[in-house]
């Protein structure tokens, strides 16, 4: 073992078995990329990827429980119990002659990157030096072609190759730069940082599904608060979440968003589960509120206005980030329950309490109270209502005549009259 301090025991048993099987068939195989970076930083990797000179069919032949996946570039998933290790064959960049054959689009974004290569070529096509590291469990040695280990020691994030060209090849690398810098406390090297703001608009050319995947990694990194602050600092937040830059300039909206991000960070760092649907609902809530108010000002009743606002905001959003339906369904339920939580008369609170999404909706309501959007008394009322006995709950309810008067005030909106401005 070299002075880096990474021992083979820190590699997952499945990754070791895959590498041993490949090396037993005279192939070269290494743990690669983020797992090596995390181990050097003293963190436990979430997964272990393997890079090899064996082709997919050869990997499959060397490891019985495996399957080949992918079309554009084939990978092999090797399985040991519940663990899956992804194995990739070394790749290289296309030859210069291929430039005119559709390798990039008109903005320089890489469209083809699926040619087998050598280990040095594979390292050269990776994005940052700290991700171009190879670790051999057998010899416990790290192969480092671009001084990634030294960059980690210096707490520096540096692009391999010309940063401007590399960002044009894949604009998502700009988001990755922000995520790595914020998550690992790294300083982005000057040449690596310089092109980010001028090239930020290239993110508009990234497929929405891929943009969503990268944003999800950023928001669930455990350092989302720092990441979003860094996104704004580098000018990368425009267009990712529509009007998020405007929201973050409004004190109430910024407090709400930052509270949601901070709570998410705390839960992740404590090893607790988090809901992406809840997080995206929080990020877009003030946009929904603003849209709902505009619709209500046109004469629509509050609840129909809220549902119309949800649809409008999500339609705009999914065109940019392609948020999956399983998340948007959760988001709409959380948003819709907010108005129901504000109504504390009659039997409505009992019905809301039985809703399967009540706990998440209550947490969302508490965020609104903590940020100053709602009176803290509402959140406190629901806290006490949950803990109270049946008789005490009956005594906590608002009087029904108050609710009826509220309904009478809303009726003109159904006939097209202008609805008074009432905050959601």
Image: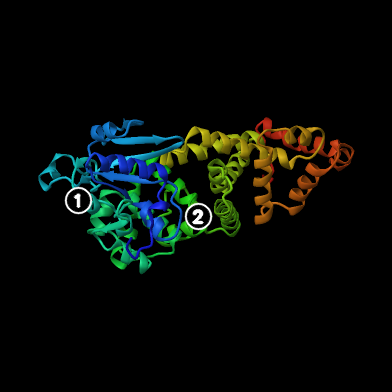
Q: Choose mark 2 or mark 1, whichever is in front.
A: 1
Q: Which of the marked residues, 2 or 1, is nearer the chain's N terminus?
A: 1
Element marked by disc 1: helix
53 or 312: nearer the viewer? 53
Residue 235 visible in this rendered orientation of the protein: no
* Colouring scheme, one of rainbow, by chain, secondary structure, one colour: rainbow
104 or 408: nearer the viewer? 104
Q: In this view, does 272 lie to the left or right of 216?
A: right
272 or 87: nearer the viewer? 87
Quarter assignment of residue 403: top right
Residue located 27% across and 63% down the image: 147
Residue located 25% across and 57% down the image: 164
Location of mark 1 (residue)? 121
Residue sitting farthest toward the left = 97
89 or 262: nearer the viewer? 89
Residue located 24% across and 32% down the image: 57
Location of mark 2 (residue)? 224
Q: Residues within 10 Å of mark 1 (few under 14, many from 20)?
A: some
Q: Which label number is shown at residue 336?
A: none
Residue 82 visible in this rendered orientation of the protein: yes
Residue sitting farthest toward the bottom = 154
Q: In this view, does 292 lie to the left or right of 209?
A: right
- Point out residue 74 in the picture as x, y percentages from the top left corner: 27, 35
Element marked by disc 2: helix
């Amino acid at each position: 073992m070299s002075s880096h301090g990474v021992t083979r025991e820190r590699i997952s048993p499945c990754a070791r078995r895959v590498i041993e099987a490949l090396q037993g068939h005279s192939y070269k195989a290494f743990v690669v990329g983020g797992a090596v970076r995390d181990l050097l930083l003293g963190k436990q990797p979430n997964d272990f990827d393997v890079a090899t000179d064996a082709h997919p069919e050869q990997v499959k032949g060397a490891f019985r429980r495996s399957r080949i996946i992918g079309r554009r570039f084939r990978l092999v998933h090797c399985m040991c119990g519940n663990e899956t290790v992804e194995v990739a064959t070394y790749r290289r960049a296309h030859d210069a002659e291929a430039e005119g054959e559709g390798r990039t689009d008109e903005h320089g974004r890489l469209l083809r990157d699926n040619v087998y290569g050598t280990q040095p070529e594979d390292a050269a096509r990776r994005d940052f030096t700290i991700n171009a590291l190879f670790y051999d469990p057998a010899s416990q040695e790290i192969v480092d072609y671009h001084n990634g280990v030294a960059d980690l020691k210096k707490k520096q994030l540096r692009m391999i190759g010309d940063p401007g060209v590399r960002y044009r090849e894949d604009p998502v690398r700009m988001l990755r730069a922000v995520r790595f810098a914020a998550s690992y406390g790294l300083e982005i090297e000057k040449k690596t940082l310089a092109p980010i703001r001028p090239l930020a608009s290239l993110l508009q050319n990234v497929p929405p599904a891929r943009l969503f995947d990268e944003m999800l990694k950023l928001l669930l990194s455990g350092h989302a608060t720092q990441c979003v602050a860094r996104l704004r600092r580098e000018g990368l937040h425009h267009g990712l979440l529509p009007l998020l830059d405007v929201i973050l300039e409004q004190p109430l909206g910024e407090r709400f968003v930052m509270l949601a991000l901070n709570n998410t960070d705390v839960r992740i760092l404590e090893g607790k589960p988090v809901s992406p649907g809840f997080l995206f609902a929080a990020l877009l809530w003030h946009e929904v509120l603003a849209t709902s108010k505009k619709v209500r000002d046109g004469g629509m009743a509050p609840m129909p206005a809220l549902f119309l606002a949800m649809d409008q905001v999500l339609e705009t959003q999914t065109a940019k980030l392609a948020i999956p339906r399983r998340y948007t369904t959760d988001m709409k339920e959380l948003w819709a329950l907010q108005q129901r939580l504000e109504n504390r008369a009659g039997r409505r609170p009992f019905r809301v309490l039985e809703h399967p999404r009540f706990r998440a909706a209550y947490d969302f309501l508490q965020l609104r109270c903590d940020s100053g959007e709602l009176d803290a008394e509402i959140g406190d009322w629901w806290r006490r209502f949950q803990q109270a006995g049946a008789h005490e709950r009956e005594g906590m309810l608002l009087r029904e005549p108050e609710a009826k008067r509220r309904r009478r005030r809303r009726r003109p909106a159904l006939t097209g009259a202008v609805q008074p401005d009432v905050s959601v």
